[in-house]
Amino acid sequence: MEGECRFCKLCIVLTLLGLTLICFAMSSGAVGTVIANFPIETSRTQIDLYLLDHSLFPQKTTERRESNYPQICIKKKFDISFLKVHKAGSTTLMNIFLRFAIENKLNIVLPRRSKGYGFNYLGYGQTLARDKIVPLPANESYNILCNHVVYNREAFRSIMPEDTVYVGIIREPVSYFKSASSYYGFYKQLQNMSEGRIPQDRIVSEFLKNTSQTKRGIYYVNNKMSFDFGIPNQKFHDDVFVEEYIKELDQDFSLVLILEHFKESLVLMKRILCWNTKDILYVPLNAMKNKPSFDLNGNDIDNLRKWNSADFKLYNYFYKVFIAKIASYGEDFKEEVENFKSIQEDVKRFCNKTIGYRDTSSFVTFPNTKWGDAFVVTVKDCKLMKEPEAPMMKRLIENAWTRYNASIAKTSFDTVK
């Protein structure tokens, strides 16, 4: 009875928030499984109310409950395509995938060049093409894709294996705009354009009132997340096209991570990919040290929502999907996230303490839990987690070319022989 009341309470609260719900009661009469079908206009604040209000979820119990998702994975996933979206924590996530590839001796889709501007891109503003990547020895296939490139279903599937799991990441659009404007120099450009005629705290506001006043420098701040996911810029404001395309993306991608819930995203990814806890450990990379130097008021955000409408639609849709996935796991998921946060803190302390040691034999051990096996973190692991993208990519590309050229030489020798 108590479980049924708690289920009713959740439905009532969400209905009062104006959210459309489909509530499925479990046949056992216990707490229902709730799948929220939020409209695309629903705000993050409304959705967060039920994610963060623990009292609306089943209480902790010593009995392990079954969930809609398998708690124990049968087969670890090795073929993965990660869409590296700009300014969305993707460099940190890329490091996770590269370390996984190194640890498991997997083939990575790598750019052909190992130096020069933008060498680490698989496609600068373009999608994937076989003539732009390091080839593989005969009869081998690619396993991991995680460099910057524009998504295209046909292009990706022509190179990645059929069983590839597709993963992406997005960021709240207002936060994205502020970060990208500062990082890529757009805010500085607006300052220079104003020539002191507009007060500093009004520069961005005046631009957002009339975004047609300049087309220069907007590449990274105008619906860039949507562009990375494959929406062409001429379709940014075609609402019907954008909404249908996003639904197609939902069919392609098993998971789109949310930067604002990064640790929850990683635990969710771990479950979907059947990975171990060690596989998702990280050290933040390429994070901005200084916060953006401008703020946006309510009117500014309304104008930004019109200009970057595709990004807002993309984010709202996949935020809803993300929350529904988390809600399906129930209390067990929250417990694993808290456990992961604790492990992350221990790993951070260990790595910060030992990264400068000449003696690299130090290590820290973590016991097995109901969410994964025991594992060891070494100084070598710390160095890989902290290694910047450029030198790691350079080394991997050069090693891949060496391996490919050696296979060609061997084939030629065997042919002559």
Image: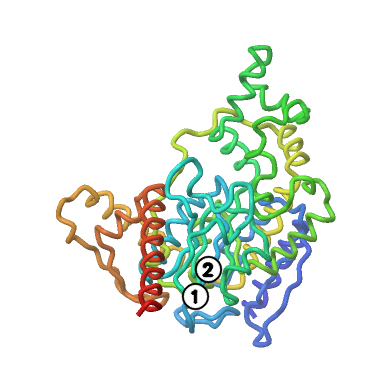
Q: CA distance from mark 2 to mark 1?
A: 7 Å
The amino acid sitting under disc 1 is Lys
The amino acid sitting under disc 2 is Ile
Secondary-structure class at tag 2: strand
Task: Residue 52: tell me if it is visible.
Answer: no
304 vs 76, left or right, is right
- Is 390 rendered above or below residue 152? above
The residue pinned by badge 2 equals 80
The residue pinned by badge 1 equals 77
359 vs 48, left or right, is left
Residue 256 in picture, x, y percent from top left: 60, 61
Residue 258 in picture, x, y percent from top left: 58, 56
Q: Label 1: few (<14), some or many (≥20) within 10 Å?
A: some
Q: Residue at x 49, y 66 (%)?
A: 144
- Is 62 rendered above or below residue 112? below
Q: Nearer the viewer, residue 196 or 328?
A: 196
Q: Residue at x 61, y 66 (%)?
A: 56
Q: Nearer the viewer, residue 219 or 20?
A: 219
CB atoms of marks 2 and 1 within 8 Å: yes
